[in-house]
Image (cartoon, helix red, strand yellow):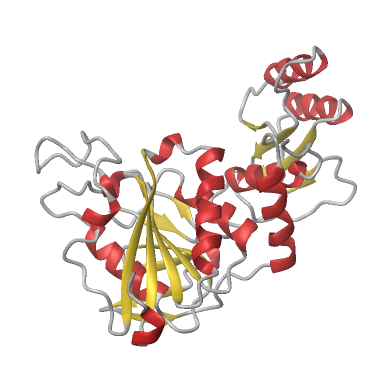
Amino acid sequence: MVDTLREGKRRVIVLGTGGTIAGRATAAGDNIGYTAGQVGVTELLGGIEAPEGIALAAEQVAQIDSKDMSFAIWRTLAERCAHWLAEPDVAGLVITHGTDTLEETAFFLQSVLAPSKPVVLTCAMRPATALSPDGPQNVRDAIAVASSPGALGVVAVCAGTVHSAFDVQKVHTYRLDAFDSGDAGPVAYVEEGAVRGLRSWPVSSQQDARELFEQMTNAARWPHVEIVMSHAEARGSLIDTLIRERQSGAAEPVEGLVLAATGNGTLHRALEEAALRAQAAGIAVVRATRCTQGRILPAPNALLRDAGALTPVKARIALVLELMADQPAAD
């Protein structure tokens, strides 16, 4: 291995996990009938030049369609990130990822790493075999962010925009600029390889992250947390079924519920009544708004706690990590 410290170079490590960015289609004009996770990360880096003073290295962590993301892959990815972030010559990391669960992976990694170096997730909306793939430019932009002085925390880079792990959401099914940061706005833009900052980079408690990371690596299993949406004519029968499963001694009973609530955390009456029964049965219950912007403003005397600005999928991750503290350690 090249001694980059002796050469005066810093490294950016590119970790591949699959996704559309690594997808192949049988025809170059097909942007939707492709198979994700086919092209290796080393091949994705072909033809991409590193910025001056930067050396690139690649590692394949997984090769999946991100809709099938799992706790096991998250754990491995977090461990590989921690390994590379500890290397003194590593400036930052890039993770190539599918778009479907990118926001979840980003929030998870920020929660368990709280890195003082940049960890940059990037993606593509068109497969690698497309006539005009968007992946190569996104990778270039991600490398620019990962090697940028002052950058830190977990962010996502897509279509020249840098989003915080706390705020990023996929908001469009098809267009190249598929991600948004809601009313918080982006962290920065990447313009011809230069990073133009707009607001603070994501920061969270490193002590809390160390504790969560240790709990994650020692846990025998991850807590079972489900998401249930409130809507017109919602019923509590699904929640009641989960309560009965828990009380019957199911192998992996539900331990937490996230309610994708309407508006400022409001719930259909029948769903709220069932959620209160779940809470009384020992299931942790959290409300998160299904709105794409804003946050839940706490109401006095609320019977169910809320997730603030977290989306339902991010609130689920936060609850999984919270409940993990009560899990027995692996043998």
Q: Is residue 62 left or right of residue 192?
A: right
Instruction: Give the number of marks.
Output: 0
Residue 119 is situated, as x and y percent measured from the top left of the image, at 48, 65
In percent of the image, x 19 and y 40: which residue is there?
A: 24
Residue 143 is situated, as x and y percent measured from the top left of the image, at 34, 70
In percent of the image, x 22 and y 46: which residue is there?
A: 127
The C terminus sits in image quarter:
top right
In depth, the one of 264 and 25 nearer the eye is 25
Q: Quadrant of residue 71?
A: top right
Residue 141 is situated, as x and y percent measured from the top left of the image, at 31, 70
Residue 205 visible within the image: no
In depth, the one of 262 and 163 nearer the eye is 163
260 up-or-down from 85: above or below: above
Residue 19 is situated, as x and y percent measured from the top left of the image, at 34, 44
The N terminus sits in image quarter:
bottom left
In percent of the image, x 47 and y 79: which residue is there?
A: 198
71 up-or-down from 10: above or below: above
In depth, the one of 231 and 191 nearer the eye is 191
Q: Is residue 235 left or right of residue 69?
A: right
In percent of the image, x 74 and y 61: which residue is there?
A: 208
Q: Is residue 81 left or right of residue 270?
A: left
Q: Quadrant of residue 33?
A: top left
